[in-house]
Structure formats: structure tokens, C-alpha cells
Image (cartoon, rainbow, N blue to C red):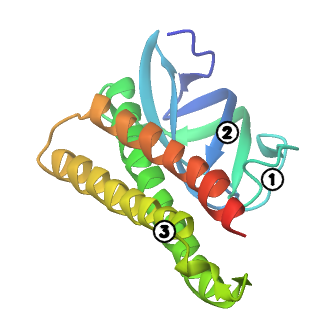
Amino acid sequence: AALRTRAEMKGDQYIVNGEKLFITNAAPGGTVAVLCKVDGELRMLVAELHVIEGDRFRTVTYQLKAPRHVTNLCLIFDEFPVPSANLLDAKGRAVAYHGLNHGRVLVATFAAGMLRLMAGMMGPWVNTRETFGAPIGSRELVQRRLGRLAARIVACDALVAWTSQLLDAGYRGELECVTAKVVASEMLKEATLDLLLKTY
């Protein structure tokens, strides 16, 4: 409700002013859904970003390590024109939450993929690395770590299947999608520190 980005009707188009922070997969020349205030209400405008940045639209890159492997930018609009036909009929907040829920499922999907990558790295390693004349893969501690990694993969897959089915069936699924994101990302963090790094 404290959103400050605004769009005002001028002629046959909206003029957008404001900043959108931490926008994933946004880039010049792309299409974005911009949540903004139109006549005091939160609404969603579909904007075609200019291919070349200029006075009306530009991006800012964050000097942070976390989003460095994905396109994650700040979008700055200054008198940016958007055709009036690009205003979505639905309430802006509902559209935004719907998109966020899909993104949360993607986080769980990403976690499942990264866990599989870890398993693919650890398998050959534990059969190659030897201590006291035997591969470390023969040790109960390492076998337990591999089992815990496999369990996390199954859990993340289950979270993705559960939340995807809810969204496909038309449910909002906000609590479920938040749960999937939090649990899966925690599993990925714990697997990285407690399973992968300790085994290596």
C-alpha cells in the first residue's frame, strides 16, 4: 500500500514515474509488468522497455554477490509512456501475488536442481577419495550424508509437485508456495554446508 510508483493518464497513454527494485530477468528491450498506483489504486501495467536506455528509462545494477548469477536490476522510470490498452483489468496486487507464487515454486525447483548437481559431484568424489586404504564412500558417515542429500531432493520435488498442482487447479496457494520456497532454500543451504563441503 506504500507503493510510490505512479502512472497518470495523459492523452491516450499512461506516464509512469518511479523505481522498481530487485526485478529478476528484466533487461532493456524486454516486457515487464509494473505494479503502480493508478488513480490511487494498485494496478498492473504491461510495459515494453526501450532497447536503449535513456532519460525516460534506465537500469541500475546492484553491487551485491547474491544476484550476480541472474539478471536482477533496479528499473527507473521518468515520464515513461505506456499505452492505455496495457492496463490489466485485474487488481494489481492479485496479479503481483500470482506472479510471486510462481516465482516461489521456481525457487524450490532451482533448489532441487542444485541438490542433484551436488549429488552428481559427490558420487564420483566419495568413490575416488580414500582414507585409511578405503574410499570414503564406504564410511557410514558419508553414506548417511548421501542419504540425507537424496531425501532433500525427494522433498524438494514433492514441494514443487504439490504447489504446482495447486496453482494449476486455480488456487492462490500463497501459504503453500511460501512454505515451498523457505523449506527448499533452507535445505539447499544446509546441504551445501553440512553435506557437500564437509564431504569434500
The image's mark for residue 53 is 1
Q: Quadrant of the C terminus?
A: bottom right
Question: Is label 2 in a helix, a strand or a loop?
Answer: strand
Residue 64 in the figure: left or right of residue 27: right
Image quadrant where residue 88 sits: top left
Image quadrant where residue 56 sits: top right
Tell me if I can see residue 25 in this picture.
Answer: no
Q: Residue 158 in the image: state x and y as whole percent.
A: 26, 55
Q: Residue at x 55, y 40 (%)?
A: 82
**What amino acid does circle 2 point to?**
Phe
Report the mark closest to the observer, 3 or 1. 3
115 vs 77, nearest the viewer: 115
Q: Marks 3 and 1, Cα distance to the nearest angstrom?
A: 48 Å
Tell me which numbered mark, 2 or 1, is placed earlier along the sequence. Answer: 2
The image's mark for residue 22 is 2
Residue count near mark 1 (Cα–Cα under 10 Å), binned few <14, some 14–19, many ≥20: few
157 vs 151, nearest the viewer: 151
Q: Residue 123 in the image: state x and y as whole percent.
A: 55, 82
Tell me which numbered mark, 3 or 2, is placed earlier along the sequence. Answer: 2
The image's mark for residue 146 is 3
